[in-house]
Image (cartoon, grey):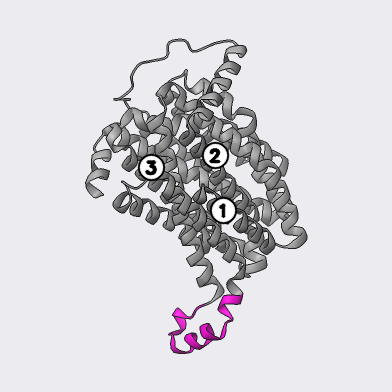
Amino acid sequence: MSTNILHALSEKSFFHLWVGEVFTQISVNLFNFFLILVVFNQTHSNTAVSLVVLSFTVPAIIFGSIAGVLVDRWSKKQVLVLTNLARALLLIFLVFSLDNLVVVYIISFIVSALTQFFIPAESPMIPLVVHRKHLLSANALFGLGIFGSILIAYVLSGPLMLLIGPQNTLLVLAALLGIGAIFISFITPTYAKGKIKEKWRTRLTVLKDIVHTLKTISRIREVLHSVLLLALSQILILIIATIAPGYASQILGIHVEEFPLLFVAPAALGMITGAVILVRFFHNHPRERIINFGIVLSGVAMLLMPYGSKVASRDFVQTLNIYLPHIFEITILHIMIVLAFILGVANAIVFVPANTIIQEKTKDEIRGKIYGMINTLAGALSLIPIILVGGLSDLVGVGWVLTGIGVSLLVLGIIRMVK
């Protein structure tokens, strides 16, 4: 595994893309959870948090597919650099308006709109800077970069706000986006097969490109499944982000600022572990089977998340705790950390092979459109769930919402396995 990964990193342009991605992802993930913390601390409402999540979800519905079409006609490198710089400027502007929730929602919306152009330029760059035989390892590395960035971002989010304050935190995030832009500017697309000369076309042609992309996705079964699963993965992350404050306070009994360290950090560590295990031991296994296992594993973890207290209160656990040192006593937090880690592993073994399938079975001129379509699908399909889970969490409790999600994932995984 290490040899394969070193081969991918030895490609200078991939290295620059990967480092730029890490800085960018740290900033973006910190910003997302930063907004959730700010709004929840001001309102103490899951519904208000839902509005934050919607502010960076709705743009995917509006701009996702169109951005994918346009990015395939533009220089992906330039798109990555310019969107990073534009988002950095917006974060600096937000420094002076952080107390105004309306402005927070608007800036979040615009930042997310720019992100819709960044995403379909990012992953499709991988086959342009890495040899085809190293795609799985490169995607695993890319996954490690994303999930490692999440780990760093969410571990730092609470402490960073406490240490330097919200305004200075935004300035740090803007600086990280600028650093990411600098590294990305060093990229040379070594494996590009040609340039698209025509950059501006009619709206009708854009619509035709979107229809053509849908037909291409539906025609290739593996690509269709991968697109839907990557969209589902994004939806689950958004839903968890929406109910995270309520889960922390209602079920775990901890402050919302502690949630990143106790839940998101082990989940991100699980994602890193899952990506490493996948490349090391299962790189030759059928990708569909690996993905199915990941879905079922996600369902089990989500289903058990609300019931950590019941497990911790069992007689055999209490008896075991008598013989364990105090620091190792099993509590609801320990159980939640383990489940978060398992959830991260499951997400990685869906994310890496699904991305690899898309890159192996599609051409460069359509790849950006496909990733734009994923953003649109994720945004459109998550709109109602995000609205519902915020209200349902306030109405019936976070536990029942998590149970419903877990059961749904288990049913989906089992159906895919028996087909």
Q: State the mark number for residue 46.
A: none
Q: How far apart are marks 2 and 3 (CA)?
A: 20 Å
Query: Which of the two discs, 3 and 1, sits closer to the camera?
Result: 3
Residue beneath the point at 74% across and 56% down: 392
Residue beneath the point at 68% across and 41% down: 383
Q: State the mark number for residue 165.
A: 1
Type of residue at label 2? Leu
Secondary structure that dominates the magenta span: helix
Rendering coords of residue 163 (x, y %): 52, 58
Residue beneath the point at 57% across and 27% down: 65
Q: How far apart are marks 2 and 1 (CA)?
A: 39 Å
Rendering coords of residue 201 (x, y %): 55, 10
Q: Name the residue under label 3.
A: 142
Q: What stretch is highlighted in magenta?
A: 310-330
324 in relation to 399, above or below: below
Check whether the beta carbons of the residues at disc 2 and disc 1 lie within 8 A of each other. no
